[in-house]
Image (spheres, grey):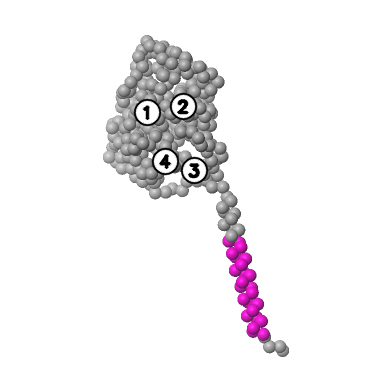
Amino acid sequence: MKKLNYSLVYTVLIAITFIAVLFLLLETRNINHASSSIPSNNEVHQSGYQFISPLLECATPHYLIKNKLETELKDIIDTNIKKRNISHASVYLRDLNNGLSLDIYKDEKFTPASLLKVPLMMAYFKLAESDPAILDKKLKVETNDSHLVQNIAPAYHLEVGKEYTVLDIIKSMIIYSDNHGVDTLLRNINPDTLNLIYQDLNIKNPKDSDPENFMSVQEYSSFFRILYNASYLNKEMSEKALQIMSLSQYKQGLRANIPESVTISHKFGERIFEDIKQLHDCGIVYQEKNPYLLCIMTRGENFNDMSFTIRELSDMVYQKFH
């Protein structure tokens, strides 16, 4: 029987170990290369605009992992409920760089109230895509829309009996949330044009639903998403809509604790029905390098307390994105 050549066995083991290590290194390199080739969750947008960022490529499907921010926002809501500042609140937040989103108490329904002035503006801008002259058309304001009680009075309003261009009426309606002229715009547009916006977004038309509490915070946020992505109106009209909303004179909600140097395109809404008050503020915060969409809807007994809650939530989000 031949003696075992230990020197040869040792050499073979060394060679096998070297080959195994080399193979492992090559596999690790391949895995890393493959990982770098996988598309990220970032959405691809077209640059060159101030207010819009047209979507060029959809993000890879993903799910937002519950994180510290969501917990902190819930804590703010729950604390304000305990203090009786609000009875309900819902939040929708979307990172406009990568499409990640979170929503809190998303199933709660609210009455959008003056927030519905945004789709009315969009309906006119949709017509203006094919007929730009419509925005220069003059309409006489024949009513002060007194049935639309405003608890947060606008700093400016149109005068009954005077003529204004459609664009001027829209600006007053959005910038100051002026109710004068809303009925004038509604009377001079085919209802199907306005209805189509709700249908395309798969949102129930307010006329087809109960007068109170028919829209969630996430549903309403869809209007801002399609404006930012220029996926419903064309680029020119989407940019115009968001530019007008950036001039909003309402400063007690999303805007309150955010520096004036940061542009915000937003719209607020308020409502009283059977002694129950609602206050909402939704918009796009153009935080440098990290814009986001934030929509907050509240219900309670006091407008000042509800606006305080909205400010607190908005400030928390801004600090996280800042």
Which label lies toward us, 4 or 3? 4
Who comes first in sequence, dot 2 or dot 4?
2
Considering depth in this image, is 209 or 132 the residue closer to the camera? 132
Residue 172 visible: yes
Report the amino acid beneath label 1: Ser
- For numbered disc 3, what is the local secondary structure? loop
Q: Is residue 31 left or right of residue 243?
A: right
The reply to whether discs 4 and 1 touch (Cβ–Cβ < 8 Å) is no
Please state the extent of the stretch shown in magenta in the rendering: 5-28
Residue annotated with mark 4? 288
The reply to whether discs 3 and 2 touch (Cβ–Cβ < 8 Å) is no
The reply to whether discs 2 and 1 touch (Cβ–Cβ < 8 Å) is no
Residue annotated with mark 2? 240
Q: Residue at x 51, y 19 (%)?
A: 132
Considering depth in this image, is 132 or 105 the residue closer to the camera? 132
Q: Residue at x 42, y 27 (%)?
A: 244
Q: Residue at x 68, y 88 (%)?
A: 3
Q: Quadrant of the N terminus?
A: bottom right
Q: Which mark is residue 248?
A: 1
Residue annotated with mark 3? 98
- The crowd level at tag 2 (other Cα within 10 Å; few <14, some 14-19, many 20+) is some
Percent of width and height locating residue 271: 35, 26
